[in-house]
Structures are given as C-alpha cells and as structure tokens.
Image: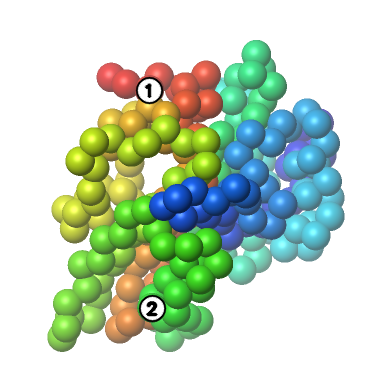
Amino acid sequence: MMRRAILALGLVAGLAGPAAAADLALQGLRLGMGEQTGEIDALYEGVYRQALRDSVGLAAPYHRIQSNFRDGRHLVLHFSSAATGHKLFWVELVRAWPEGQEKDTADNLVRQLEGQFGPAAQKVDDRQEGRAFGSLALVWTAEDSAPLPDGFALTTDDLNKLFDQSFQERVAMFGPGFKGLIVQVGIADGKVRALRQELVDLKLGASVLVPGP
C-alpha cells in the first residue's frame, strides 16, 4: 500500500455552498476516502501519475503523503488513525506563480468556484482600490458538517492567520465539528499569485491530532 501510495496525485479542491453541497469532492478525492480501500491507489496510478515530480509517505507522528508536482503544486494528504481506517481527513494544496506567469484573475477564480458550487458560506476580501496587493478567503461547509460557531464571521484580520494556522487553531476558529473547504488567495494587480486550498474534516482529524491546547 505505501509503495503504491507515493506514486502520484493531483487536486484542486472540493467545495460546498452555504446550504451545503451533497458531494464535497473534486478530481476523485473525497474526505473520508480510506487509504486501504484502493480508491486513492487508483488515482495515484491513473490520471495523476504523469503530473508528479516526487512524493514521500511519512508514518510519524501519523500517516501523511507529501507530493510535489511538475506545475509547482505542493500537496499534503493527512490520514486518520488505523482504528478509523486511515481515512483522508485533510488535504492541503498550495501553489504560487512567479510575477508575470499568473494565469487567472482573482475575480474570475471566485466566479468559477461559486458558479460550480454555489455562494461561499463565508467570504472576506481585503483588496483596496489603488493598492497592488491583497488577499481573500472563502469557506464552504460540507453537508454533514457541524454548524459554524454562533456569530462566526471571517474578518480581514483573519486573512494572515489562515495562511499559517495549525490544526488546533483551525479547530478553535471553525469549531471541532467543521467539515468543508477553505480557500485562500494571494493577489497581485488583480491576478492570483498564490493559492492555498484545504479540504478538511476536523472531527475525523481528532483521531490523530489533539484538537485543543
């Protein structure tokens, strides 16, 4: 399983709207997919294989797979405990584009995401007219996610925090039962310069990570 599991993988993200989409998935990956069922192996050995530059499986402190792709994407897959079936509970995908090589505008990216999956449950944007750099974040909740905490609302102060939060800080912000997608976008002159996408099930992740301090 481990030998096959480090072959290849590609992902953009799976989303759900504020009313929650029934299928939180993209490119064949879903939260809760079991590593030992062969579903993820099939992806590694199939359509993603040629895209991979290198990949490594890590067993401590819990099972993860880190992959780098030829187009610059960096992907980390996190799996739950053996007792829960080594299920996928967190997918982190990060990509950055050098100046002059950006391929899309931030507004177009948001339109594409919300056009496919509906309006985000949460959205915050700190762009200002006349300022070259900015950022935005969007959050979608899964159909079986616990509700966001009462009064929860992303603010511009949260934007920098989101880019470098630990699992525990995610739990503190979104609640221990959150399941969904978090998208963070770094913007330069209106174009996407950096993109971080997280498909995460915080409840399942508590099988291997302490959810609080």
Asked which secondary structure carries label 2, the reply is helix
- Mark 1 crowd level (few <14, some 14–19, many ≥20, 10 Å Cα): some
Find residue 36 and report its image quarter. top right
Work out whether 42 lies above or below 81: below
**Which quarter of the figure is the N terminus placed in?**
top right
Residue behind mark 1? 211
Image: 124 above or below 130: above
Q: Residue furthest top?
A: 83
Residue 107 image label: 2
State which mark lies toward you, 1 or 2: 2
Q: Quadrant of residue 64?
A: top right
- Mark drawn on residue 76: none
Residue 34's x, y, as percent? 71, 31
| x, y percent for residue 119 | 41, 62
Taking the image as drawn, is residue 92 in sight? no
In the rendered structure, the answer to whether residue 48 lies left or right of residue 62 reads: right
Residue 43 x/y as whole percent: 78, 50
Mark 1 element type: loop
Spatial CA distance of label 1 from label 2 is 34 Å
Q: Do the CB atoms of the residues marked 1 and 2 lie less than 8 Å apart? A: no
Image position of 148 with respect to 153: above or below: above
Tell me the residue at 69%/36% (across/down). 33
Q: Quadrant of the C terminus?
A: top left
- Amino acid, disc 2: Asp
Q: Amino acid at mark 1?
A: Pro
| Residue 9, position as x, y percentages in the image | 70, 52
Of labels 1 and 2, earlier in sequence is: 2
Does residue 114 lie above or below 162 as drawn? below
